[in-house]
Image: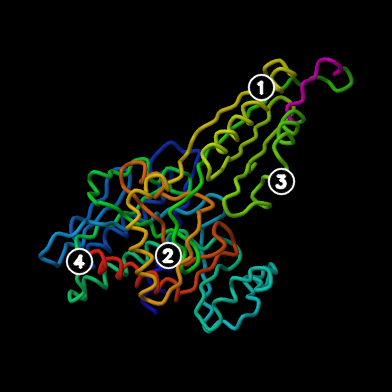
Amino acid sequence: MQHIIDRFISYITIDTQSDSSSDTTPSTEKQWNLANKLVDELKAIGLSDVTIDDNAYIMATLPSNVDHDVPTIGFISHFDTSPDFSSTNVNPQIIRNYDGKDIVLNKEKDIILSSSYFDDLLQYIGQTIITTDGTTLLGADDKAGITEIVTAMEYLKNNPEIKHGTIRIGFTPDEEIGRGAHKFDVEKFGAAWAYTMDGSQIGELEYENFNAASAKITVKGKSVHPGYAKGKMVNAILIANKIISEFPKHEIPEETSGREGFFHVHHFEGEIENATVELIIRDHDLKHFNKRKELAQDIVKKYNTEFNNCIELELKDQYFNMKEKVAPVFHIVETAKKAMEDIGIKPIIKPIRGGTDGSQLSYMGLPCPNIFAGGHNFHGKYEYVPVESMQKAVEVIVRICELTANQ
């Protein structure tokens, strides 16, 4: 257990926060710090063909140890962390033999990880849990996945009696800003299919995800002295508020679950002459997704008519539901499901309420379901991961490799 804890902590204490406002790849220079460390580590554990390209995409190979043809498979994770919350000076806390009670993350700031509010914690009584100190995120998304893949490859390398085909691994930057697969070389990777280790709680197995788009609405106003503003002032802040109010008030992340889609306003900035609203649009169903985008266009059109074309809408598709690409090769999901069952894990098959590199990779020709990495409460100070879940994820990877070689 200590080996996996040490490896995980060595990753999360390196700040790799990505930045959506940057047009470079990786989007932040600091992502190279972990990328270069990973390259050295992969070489040290004995993997072959370890490469890192000019955009910090890492690939490596564990060669086959069987004498019959086996499909080449892959495992993929991302090393950036979310820009939603600080990842500078991550100071993890290790809670051994968790007792089911509230965990004080930061006594001085009165930040508590409450088992009554975050009741998933109660699944892990008696286990070892790694938390934040309440001032940063943890980075289990997705450094837990990287930890598990590296540890599984190391285990297979050191235990050649476990038979497997050729295994490819890939680590990407900038997944958290929707660009993790943009420059991934699927042809170079050379796998028939792969799995992203980027899910949450133990047992998760996902092959459906949101269709996703981003929308940026910019309102141009006119500032006039308020005492003489009648018929002249155009208040961009008020118009932006009107636009926000047009979206269905219950179709938001806080009030939706399962396959229900939503509109999520995540950024608002404004003054009288200029206001900006940024939101994301999500839906598992493609028809509903397209209708959501049409609604955004119709709302902007309505207020452009009322306010003399002072509004601009920038609408961009981000990724699509991978189900369409995974369904024709559904045996890859069945293999992962059997691997979990073989080691005593009950699979939790459900749609992802988010995105993953696997969704884009599936549309690039690499079918790529998503497997749990073990963490909870991603992108914030309440993030945590049970070490036993990471250990089980390692076992799942190893078992998938065995099953693929024996099919």
**Which sits earlier in the primary sequence, circle 3 or circle 1?**
3
Q: In the rendered structure, which amino acid carries the disc numbered 1?
A: Lys
Mark 3: give few (<14), some (14-19) or many (20+) Cα within 10 Å: few
Identify which residue, 227 or 114, lies in the foreground: 114
Which is closer to the viewer, label 4 or label 3?
Answer: 3
Q: Is residue 269 positioned above or below 87 on the image? A: above
The residue singled out by tag 2 in the image is 144
Q: Position of residue 5 (x, y in %)?
A: 41, 74
Does dot 4 land on a helix, a strand or a loop? loop
Does dot 1 land on a helix, a strand or a loop? helix
The residue singled out by tag 4 in the image is 46
Q: Residue visible at 55% across and 67% down?
A: 132
Q: CA distance from mark 3 to mark 1?
A: 22 Å
Q: Residue visible at 42% across and 47% down?
A: 322
**Which sits earlier in the primary sequence, circle 4 or circle 3?**
4
Circle 4/circle 3 CB separation < 8 Å: no
**Which sits earlier in the primary sequence, circle 2 or circle 1?**
2
The residue singled out by tag 1 in the image is 301
Q: CA distance from mark 2 to mark 3?
A: 33 Å
Q: In the rendered structure, which amino acid carries the disc numbered 3?
A: His
Taking the image as shown, residue 292 lies to the left or right of residue 185, namely: right
Magenta residues (range): 229-237
Q: Residue visible at 26% across and 61% down?
A: 40
Mark 1: give few (<14), some (14-19) or many (20+) Cα within 10 Å: some
Kindly tell me whether residue 266 is visible in this rendering.
no
Q: In the rendered structure, which amino acid carries the disc numbered 2?
A: Ala
